[in-house]
Image: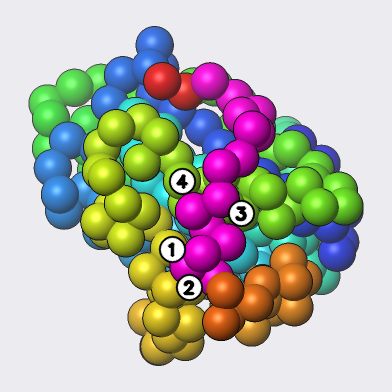
């Protein structure tokens, strides 16, 4: 994955063989804590959703995302290093918790460049994912996504998303957010189910 500053990317990965990556409710919280630790310093997170066997992020690459760093004999962008640290630290903790070994995630995290109106479509797709998967009847019932942050347009200290930036970049209308979010979308970049 190679990011360019200012562009918006749909970033996702899933468990090896579509296996679960979250085994207990506290695993979701631990993943988000590490997401804040390793990714918010190197990109602007616009949306996120954690599903039982995969995750979605919508990010904008910024000045901190793109510098190349050396990691042993490898060179990678700062954002890719952040993803590596996030997945590695989370895998170590879950492997210890579950008494397992080996990779938890598929080898390569994907980052799809979104252009034009596709960024807004990806934003809504990410929030609709739990409902479309049949995990909840309403998006607001899934506690492991940024939908609730946006529904309240709450910019609390605990917010992972840069809501102000997302509202500007994605042309989100706070007065119509809830209604717009429930529009039917025919967008499915990856079949995770």
SS state under label 1: loop
Give the label, 4 or 1, closer to the camera: 4
Classify 10 Å Cα crowding around label 3: few (below 14), some (14-19), many (20 and above): many
The quadrant of the image that shows the N terminus is: top right
Alpha carbon of mark 2 to alpha carbon of mark 3: how far?
11 Å
Earlier in the chain: of badge 2 and badge 4, it is: 4
SS state under label 4: helix
Q: Is residue 57 left or right of residue 68?
A: left
- x and y percentages locating residue 73 in the rendered image: 72, 34
Does the magenta run of residues contain 62?
A: no
Q: Is residue 146 left or right of residue 118?
A: left
Residue at (77, 47) in percent of width and height: 118
Mark 3 sits on what residue? 123
Query: In front: 98, or 127?
Result: 127
Does the magenta run of residues contain 181?
A: yes
Residue at (32, 60) in percent of width and height: 140
- x and y percentages locating residue 158 in the rendered image: 37, 80
Q: Quadrant of residue 146?
A: bottom left
Earlier in the chain: of badge 4 and badge 1, it is: 4
Q: Is residue 105 left or right of residue 30?
A: right
Give the label, 1 or 2, closer to the camera: 2
Mark 2 sits on what residue? 150
Mark 4 sits on what residue? 128
Alpha carbon of mark 2 to alpha carbon of mark 4: how far?
13 Å
In the rendering, which numbered label is found on residue 146? 1
SS state under label 3: helix
Segment colored magenta: 177-191
Tags 1 and 2 in contact by the CB under 8 Å rule? yes
Tags 2 and 4 in contact by the CB under 8 Å rule? no
Asked if 84 appears above or below 32 in the picture, the reply is above
Classify 10 Å Cα crowding around label 2: few (below 14), some (14-19), many (20 and above): many
């Amino acid at each position: 994955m190679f990011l360019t500053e200012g562009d918006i990317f749909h970033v996702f990965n899933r468990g090896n063989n579509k296996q679960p990556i979250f085994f207990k409710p506290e695993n979701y919280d631990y993943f988000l804590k590490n997401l804040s630790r390793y990714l918010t310093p190197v990109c602007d997170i616009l949306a996120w959703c954690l599903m039982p066997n995969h995750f979605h992020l919508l990010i904008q690459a910024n000045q901190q995302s793109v510098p190349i760093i050396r990691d042993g004999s490898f060179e990678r962008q700062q954002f890719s290093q952040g993803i590596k640290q996030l997945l590695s630290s989370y895998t170590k903790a879950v492997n210890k918790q579950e008494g397992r070994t080996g990779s938890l995630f598929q080898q390569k995290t994907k980052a799809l460049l979104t252009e034009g109106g596709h960024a807004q479509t990806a934003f809504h797709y990410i929030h609709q994912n739990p409902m479309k998967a049949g995990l909840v009847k309403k998006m607001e019932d899934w506690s492991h996504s940024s939908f609730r942050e946006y529904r309240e347009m709450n910019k609390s200290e605990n917010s992972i998303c840069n809501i102000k930036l997302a509202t500007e970049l994605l042309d989100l209308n706070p007065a119509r957010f809830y209604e717009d979010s429930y529009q039917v979308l025919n967008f499915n970049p990856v079949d995770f189910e």
